[in-house]
Image (cartoon, rainbow, N blue to C red):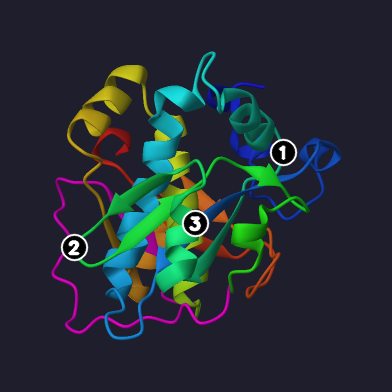
Amino acid sequence: MSPDSHTPADSPFRSERTVRDEAPQFVMPLVVRIERGAPPARTDALETAARAVLVMLSDERSVGDGEWAEVMRDWQDARIRKVVRRARGAEWRRAETLPGITVTGKSAEVRVFPPVPLDGWPKELAKLQVSGTDLDDPEPPVEADAAAPVLWLSPDLDMSAGKAMAQAGHGAQLAWWALSEEERSAWRDAGFPLAVRTADPGRWGELTGSGLPLVRDAGFTEIAPGSCTVVADHPALR
């Protein structure tokens, strides 16, 4: 199944059981660097995670006959799972030795890895903790540029930074699938500019009913199945 064949009824994020659940299940690991004295800003971590997913999806190793292409296809044919874990010091250095891509933001570093079997994490990553990824913004994020892609988070859900990073990655991926090849190339060539912001409560209903790509979480962790978490507002999709 090609990523471009996805339809709303075929969404990999639906809470209802589908044919995707019969396929072998994979997870895309993301590791965020959180040093004790210098944690990244929350919004920057979310934006860097979303860009990391896009960089992985568009990397030459992930498509065609690339070395990661087969596992990327298998992952996209099943449920789309992403798990964010944290690392510092020697943990981070060990994570960097594994095949993957490190994406750097203003204050955040996120390393994304090709998908692994759900129960087959490399030992260097399996030891890392999911908890402890609560992050803060030292200052309120500036208003998002309306001319650039914005991943709008639900104002109704309380998610840890790690969970929100994964959801932002889901939203970026749905936007990527919805774009034409020309639009994808333009976004990639520009360096995947994007913003992640929490939607105004008064506008959330409008966003979820707009027809823009919408993530409905499968409910594996933290939030209820079927919860609307992210709307991917790319200018080319408006």
Q: Which residue is mark 3?
A: 95
What label sits on residue 13 in the rendered view? none
Q: Can you see residue 88?
A: no
In this rendering, the answer to whether 208 lies above or below 176 is below
User: What number is the disc on residue 106?
Assistant: 2
Q: Is residue 82 left or right of residue 102?
A: right
- Amino acid at dot 1: Ala
Residue, far top:
65
Q: Quadrant of residue 223?
A: bottom right
Q: What is the residue that sits farthest to the right in this orientation?
A: 22
Q: Look at the picture and state if 40 lies above or below 151.
A: below
Q: Give the Cα separation between the discs numbered 2 and 3.
A: 21 Å
Q: Amino acid at mark 2?
A: Lys
The residue depicted at 52 percent of the width and 14 percent of the height is: 64
Distance, label 1 to label 2, CA atoms, is: 33 Å
Badge 1 is on which residue?
Answer: 78
The mark closer to the camera, 1 or 2, is: 2
Residue 140 locus on image (x, y percent):
19, 80
Reading the chain from its start, which is encountered first: label 1 or label 3?
1
Dot 2, crowdedness within 10 Å: few (<14), some or many (≥20)? few
